[in-house]
Image: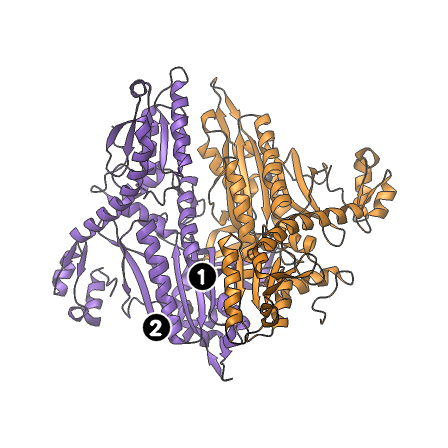
Chain colours: A orange, B purple
Amino acid sequence: MARVLTPRAEDFPRWYQDLIAKAELADNGPVRGTMVIRPTAYAIWERMQADMDARIKVTGAENAYFPLFIPESYLKREAQHVEGFSPELAVVTHGGGKPLAEPIVVRPTSETVIGEFMAKWVDSYRDLPLLLNQWANVVRWELRPRLFLRTSEFLWQEGHTAHATEADAKDYTLRIHHEVYERHMRELLAIPVVVGRKTDRERFAGATSTYTLEAMMGDGKALQMGTSHELGQNFAKAFDITYSSSTGSREHAWTTSWGTSTRMVGGLIMCHGDDNGLRIPPLLAPTQVLVTVVKETDGSVTSAARTVYEDLLAVGVRAKLDDRVDTPFGRRAVDAELKGIPLRVEVGPRDLANGQVVLVRRTDGSKTPLALAELVGAATAALEQDQKALYDSALEFRESRTADVSTLDDALAAAATGWARLPWSAVGVEGEARANAEAVTVRCL
Amino acid sequence: MARVLTPRAEDFPRWYQDLIAKAELADNGPVRGTMVIRPTAYAIWERMQADMDARIKVTGAENAYFPLFIPESYLKREAQHVEGFSPELAVVTHGGGKPLAEPIVVRPTSETVIGEFMAKWVDSYRDLPLLLNQWANVVRWELRPRLFLRTSEFLWQEGHTAHATEADAKDYTLRIHHEVYERHMRELLAIPVVVGRKTDRERFAGATSTYTLEAMMGDGKALQMGTSHELGQNFAKAFDITYSSSTGSREHAWTTSWGTSTRMVGGLIMCHGDDNGLRIPPLLAPTQVLVTVVKETDGSVTSAARTVYEDLLAVGVRAKLDDRVDTPFGRRAVDAELKGIPLRVEVGPRDLANGQVVLVRRTDGSKTPLALAELVGAATAALEQDQKALYDSALEFRESRTADVSTLDDALAAAATGWARLPWSAVGVEGEARANAEAVTVRCL
Ligand SMILES: [Zn+2]
Ligand SMILES: [Zn+2]
């Protein structure tokens, strides 16, 4: 088969770009840094959203929607924070055909507006905890865009909660971090994440603790898949989020915030993709099994393929029928590989004459001839096994690229090809500064 | 009970505004014309979205996501169209801390970008039909904003499709209009819509046919709940969307577009709301039954209420338990009424002593004492009846406010309190102009 993608070992960033184009996942938008998410990738994002959203709701949070536009003055309130965003802002200066009296910022996050409204909505301890989440687009001007990983506009969820006590805020942050984010990534995305705290240097401005989930990509580098923050009373003080306690005193609330974004799609590609394309974990895959008519003779092949397809649907498998026999079979097979569909069932006239079809697994590339009667059972078993296989192989890869070391020098050497694990006491604040100077970051405590 | 809302008959727009504030549905955002959709209303919108999205997918359309930002030059391409939007645009002139070389427009619709990409993605007749849908926020500068009905930013879905033939484009438009929009509105929202075509005067710029769904609000006025357009080859010619036919000739595609928005939430409020608040049709309601602990004595009331709540969940009813006994019962009851929760079950110590609870129906305000064992059956029956009852009463109201007339003069008189139905031959293009001059529109053919 002709080489479709640049091999990962040759040029990883190029492989990533090739894959996104050839698998029809996304395109660059007409404004630099923006992205068109094509149906193949959007369906993956929708399933991520649905799973994450259900888990968020279990924790008691409710979804709301805050405006895209924020008065520029709002971003001056929380000064420490804004300095981090200022060069990243897109500013609207004209509306309704006229210059605006006050410029408007396109939200880089809804934090400031949500803070403003939390202050209005919280009055008594009875109003706490206030648990809000939002799914929305945000804009942060990006000079070196990369599809899904760094785009000027991206889609995300941002959660913001207010609590009566520090302990409650901490418990909730950890619950989101472990029960929502970690489990979503491990169980649905099949990505083994390392979960921990950020150093003071890497912590989110204004947070008292920042928790992170770090995943190893196919090039041995780390990608931050999500973060959760305890904001102490800093945020509540900046926005005047106060409540009257049961004893009548006026107290500042304790707040948290937490977010994940379309960057997870980039992480999925770079964690599970191989030289033939994407590999989507079966639980996540919008299409789990593609039933392909290899070629048609008298109509009987398509009819047999349709029966297989319907049998799969009947047991709850997300199957799709590919009967586009006017497109060459080879091209359709390569396309399904590129797009990472977990299983293909090839239905062709020769095999059918023997009562057989071929089951092709994307995870390991194996092709197994099967009697028609065995197909559904074999497919459902393969889906379950391959979900685990993808997780296990990502974990094995990570371990093979993680060196246990005891000195900073050894850690910096190991970081050239992967990760290093060592005691924080061997690094310290000075060691972290030295590592940063060599473009190595301390990701997770 | 004290009057909570301005009565509809006294001042309908004021009632609408009161209801939105008191039921905690939405707030004005800090930038004029923008809106904060609070959890109570956002949960309604999410359920509208889920139902509509599933219906759209059944027609074969796939979701995608196109960028928020559009180069200003894009909007000059389809000149006829742009003239309609120009004063409505929000324009970004600064990004990354610097003035931009070319101004960027915040999308008033994604039509132009989608046209651009359709032209890239469509090459052969095999690529057709191309059926795309997008859920997104859009911005159209609004000088006289009204929450949900006219806001500068709103949430919507916009569908755009390309077909090989005019007949296919027409069939698909009508399928979306009837099977998706009309059924969504009738079956889920319980709103009896009048479905038909727009006059040439009211037709969307660039469309060859515009189909509309019109609903009568509680003040006798019409609200357009959604539109679908056949665009002929106009749009394909503007964007160069061509395909090679099976005989090898190069042809322009036939395109359609169709959209519905958060305006439907406004329509829902104005169609079903009464002087006590919102009434949400049971199938749509995020919470169908609120099980309320009237007051607690020794813990036994809450425990009985919890059993009722769990019994309802067990049969698939979306129930919620209200055990906030430190908030006065009356206030909680008014709140549930305002928010339009279809059923309340009042669990109080006195009724419980007789083995009873009280079922309160939002639709007609009736209160029925029931033996505990009868509750679940009675509640599920009431949910089913009240879905129908809301539809029937909206239909009855509409009929009572619609006059069958034969002259334009009689129609204009009828329009003062409701709708008029008359032959188009009695109106005509000149009659329509005269009606418009008196602020009466011809809504639907
Ligand atoms: Zn902040
Ligand atoms: Zn147009």
Instruction: State the residue position of label 1.
Output: B109
Residue B202 placement, left or right of A26: left
Q: How far apart in space, not on screen, are marks 1 and 2 (Cα)?
A: 19 Å
Residue closest to the eye, B189 or A328: A328
Alpha-carbon neighbours of circle 2 within 10 Å: few (<14), some, or many (≥20)?
some
Quadrant of ligand 2: it is bottom left
Give the amino acid at mark 1. Thr
Picture coordinates of residue A353 (x, y %)?
Answer: 59, 70
Q: Is residue B192 above or below residue A166?
A: below
Name the image quarter holding residue B82. Answer: bottom left
Name the image quarter holding residue A234. Answer: top right
Picture coordinates of residue B280 (x, y %)?
Answer: 32, 42
Q: Which mark is residue B208?
A: 2
Picture coordinates of residue A5 (x, y %)?
Answer: 70, 66
Residue A158 placement, left or right of A99: right
Q: Which chain contains the residue that carries disc 2?
A: B
